[in-house]
Image (spheres, rainbow, N blue to C red):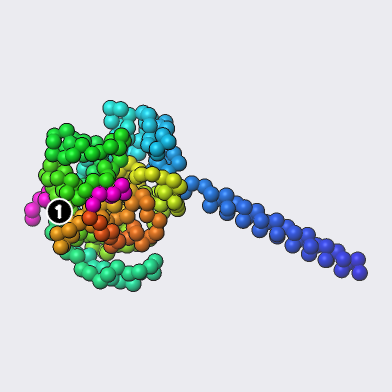
């Protein structure tokens, strides 16, 4: 009898220890879930829904303020200490993307084959700083109200975006060009590959999660270098959606934005049909190929 009571006592102790361990695991998991997801590259610090330069503060309206001590390694500081991605273009070789394979993450892409000739594409979205140069020259409207020069210009109509691209010696990318730049010849699900939609690769879900809460705008252009395509094009998923010229002569916005919450909104083939400006829509330009002719 004493031995039986001892066994029952040991069992009760073991059960209690197991229960406490389970509670501890649940608490640790909940704490981890509450942490801000890693999203800012080295040189930028998380400030609520933004990635700001080290030493910068955040205004009530969600703008990085002050002189940055450091910026991301792919960025520079302008004369005012703001972080800014230098203008650059990426050569995109001619090729074909095939879409329509089964997609285990959700609805498949509509069956399509996209073929393009070689062209150049802006490495990242057109910034406020670049757009202001066009406005000062009188070729673009003075409508870039964002005080941060390194953020993508937005709330721009497709006609205004086209005017800027013409000023810069280019044009808006066609839908096929944009798709091929994002998907490549492999028909990638995301610009960087087929998996890995996380907050450090794309500036998305900044308003209602999963990457932040109460965000009111995009991050700096180029603030997600881990989301680059193999060719080095940045921000083709998230930050701001981008105007493209469609086959019917109209326009659409592609790539999702800081407001996007679902994976389907950020896949390379996702498209938002729009006719006019919006606070989450910007653009980049395409150009004639600079690759040496063979």
Residue shown at the point (45%, 47%) measured from the top left: 213
Q: Quadrant of the C terminus?
A: bottom left
The image position of residue 56, as x and y in percent, is 40, 32
Query: On screen, 199 above or below 59?
Result: below
In-front residue for pair 105/196: 105
Residue at image position (65%, 53%) is 24
Residue 4 appears left or right of 174: right
Q: Which residues are magenta?
A: 276-294
Q: Is residue 133 visible?
A: yes
Taking the spot 34% from the left edge, 45% from the top edge, the residue there is 218
Image location (x, y in percent) of residue 280: 31, 49
Q: Could you tell me if residue 53 is visible in this image?
A: no
Q: Quadrant location of residue 133? A: top left
Q: Position of residue 21 (x, y in %)?
A: 67, 56
> Does residue 107 lie above or below 182 as drawn?
below
Q: Residues within 10 Å of mark 1 (few under 14, many from 20)?
A: many
- Answer left or right for 120 relative to 36: left
Disc 1 marks which residue? Answer: 119
Residue 198 as seen in the image, left or right of residue 188: right
On whether residue 154 falls in the magenta region, the answer is no
């Amino acid at each position: 009898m004493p031995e039986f009571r001892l066994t029952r006592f040991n069992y009760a102790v073991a059960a209690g220890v197991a229960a406490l361990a389970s509670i501890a695991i649940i608490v640790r998991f909940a704490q981890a879930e509450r942490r801000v997801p890693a999203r800012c590259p080295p040189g930028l610090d998380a400030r609520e829904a933004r990635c700001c330069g080290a030493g910068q503060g955040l205004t009530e309206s969600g703008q990085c303020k002050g002189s940055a001590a450091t910026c991301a390694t792919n960025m520079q500081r302008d004369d005012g200490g703001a972080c800014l991605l230098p203008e650059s273009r990426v050569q995109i070789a001619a090729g074909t993307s095939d879409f329509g394979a089964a997609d285990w993450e959700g609805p498949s892409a509509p069956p399509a084959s996209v073929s393009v000739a070689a062209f150049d594409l802006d490495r990242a979205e057109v910034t406020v700083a670049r757009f202001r140069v066009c406005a000062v020259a009188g070729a673009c409207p003075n409508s870039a109200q964002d005080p941060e020069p390194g953020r993508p210009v937005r709330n721009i109509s497709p006609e205004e975006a086209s005017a800027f691209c013409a000023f810069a010696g280019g044009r808006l990318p066609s839908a096929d060009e944009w798709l091929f730049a994002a998907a490549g010849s492999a028909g990638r699900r995301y610009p960087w590959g087929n998996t890995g939609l996380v907050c450090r690769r794309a500036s998305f879900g900044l308003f209602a999660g999963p990457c932040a809460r109460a965000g009111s705008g995009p991050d700096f252009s180029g603030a997600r270098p881990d989301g680059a395509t193999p060719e080095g094009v940045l921000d083709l998923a998230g930050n701001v959606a981008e105007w493209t010229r469609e086959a019917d002569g109209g326009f659409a916005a592609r790539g999702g934005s800081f407001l996007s919450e679902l994976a389907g909104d950020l896949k390379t083939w996702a498209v938002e049909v729009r006719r006019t400006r919006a606070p989450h829509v910007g653009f980049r330009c395409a150009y004639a190929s600079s690759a040496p002719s063979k």
